Amino acid sequence: MTMFTDSKNGQAMKQENGPKRIQVSLIESFSNFIADQGLPLTYGPPAAMTILSSMIGRRLFIRTNRGRMFLNAFRFLIGAPGIGKSLTTDLVDQCLKESKLGVMTAAKSVTKASFVDEIAAESSRRPWGVDASEIVSALLVNSSEYGVFLGDKTDESLLRTLCDMFDGRTYIETRRSIKTGPITVEIPYLNILTATQPEHFAVQFPRQAWASGMANRCDFYVSETMAESPDYYLDYSEESNSRNNLVNSFCRDVAHDLQCIAADISANVGKQIVLTEEARDRFIDWYEHDRVKTQLTHPWLLDYNTRRAFRLRRDAALVAIARADTDYTITLPDLNYTIDLHLDQEFGLINLLHKAVASDSADIINLIYAWAMREFLETKKPIQHSRLTEQILTKVEVSKVNYIISHLISTEALFAIKQRERSPGVYDNLSVPEYKPNLKYRVQKA
């Protein structure tokens, strides 16, 4: 038996000898298991990566010319009620508890003050830094309902605090009573795994979250696939008990692997995760070509583009760790797997945002298009931006105007005209575009 220390209480723990029980990759094994349980396959990677990044702390990192980058993340599971979001977050809780690695989990519902108190508490402090002397205030938010975690109203100051914590900046708060005194969190390390429904996402994220910088620090995993069986609603039986035993057995296997990975990390504190030469060439190729071709154009996602390279390096590092690579190198298969994972993730997010724009009323797009057609046929001229904005404001609040226009253009209901022909062959660039309805939009839509 091998002994290593439980970082929470300092007691020695027993680690069973032998090879990893989950072969190939913890991420793939986790994904396959939850798919077998009828949960969305899409939720497997974020769940497994959250477990890994929460137990790693700042002991492993990526070092670039811009400095050290750590592996924490804010991950959101998005899907309809009953799809399996809560079951996924519960599975993460169970695996971490079984591992006994001392990962501290935050309360499921917080105010800004209570959240700061939790991450500043002595119980959150761990020797999980780049060397033995660096003590990290580490916390995992694992909440099955994002709305419950934040409450009914979004506290913008809490969102900005979360951004600071994500970036690992020293946080000092003096807005407390004289008795309480100032609070300092010198080295925060925060991970979030939470879930929400598409309708709540549409309300919560387009406003304060994007404006505060919170949302462009998040990774969103959208699933519309629901696997249901009448067996879920039948009476409890020995057969269903064996299903529960299967979950418990899987969590114990994950815990065993996490202990093995933690033992390796403890022997390699401060280890830099690097790219192999093949992976480096592929990353450069992706950055210069694939990244540009797949640039996100939705107004909500423009800031998201700037963090795509960081996300790829971070998640590829977690993929390498998930297969217990003690060399801590990102291989070409690691990088390609992560690229494919991100493409699926971004495609789902773009679809969700297009639906969110029209979620308040399915008729808005059709009403604006019908008005634009009448306006164009009557005047025989492109529609001015101010005129279009004025019309949309009669249907939606001001915060949604630009998103409605973007949706009309992306669905090709309207064409944006950015040049005007002043004389044959001579064009003027328009500072503000004008719009022309697509006369074939109805046919294309049908």
Image (cartoon, rainbow, N blue to C red):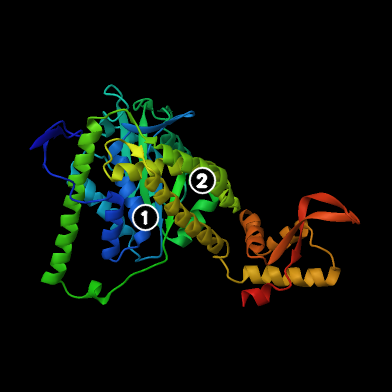
Q: What secondary structure is found at the residue carrying circle 2?
A: helix
Question: Where, quadrant-wise, is the N terminus in this rendering?
Answer: top left
Question: Where, quadrant-wise, is the C terminus in this rendering?
Answer: bottom right
In the displayed structure, 269 sits above or below 281; it is above
Mark 1 vs mark 2: which is more N-terminal? 1
| Res 442 seen here | yes
Residue occupying image coordinates x 13% and y 65%: 242
Which three-letter amino acid code belongs to the residue tagged 2?
Trp
Is the C-beta separation of discs 1 and 2 under 8 Å? no
Circle 1 packing at 10 Å, graded few (<14), some (14-19), many (20+), is many
Residue under numbered circle 1: 145
Find the residue positioned furthest to the front.
278
Residue occupying image coordinates x 28% and y 43%: 105
Could you tell me residue 62's position as x and y percent?
40, 33
Could you tell me residue 216's position as x and y percent?
50, 45
Circle 2 packing at 10 Å, graded few (<14), some (14-19), many (20+), is some
User: In this orientation, which residue lies closer to the viewer: 313 or 281?
Assistant: 281
| Res 156 seen here | no
Could you tell me residue 186's position as x and y percent?
37, 26
- Relative to 408, 385 lies left or right: right
- Relative to 404, 131 lies left or right: left
Mark 1 and mark 2: span between their CA atoms?
35 Å
- Relative to 12, 37 lies left or right: right
Residue occupying image coordinates x 26% and y 64%: 36
Identify the mark at residue 286; answer none if there is no mark.
Answer: 2
In the displayed structure, 19 sits above or below 29; it is above
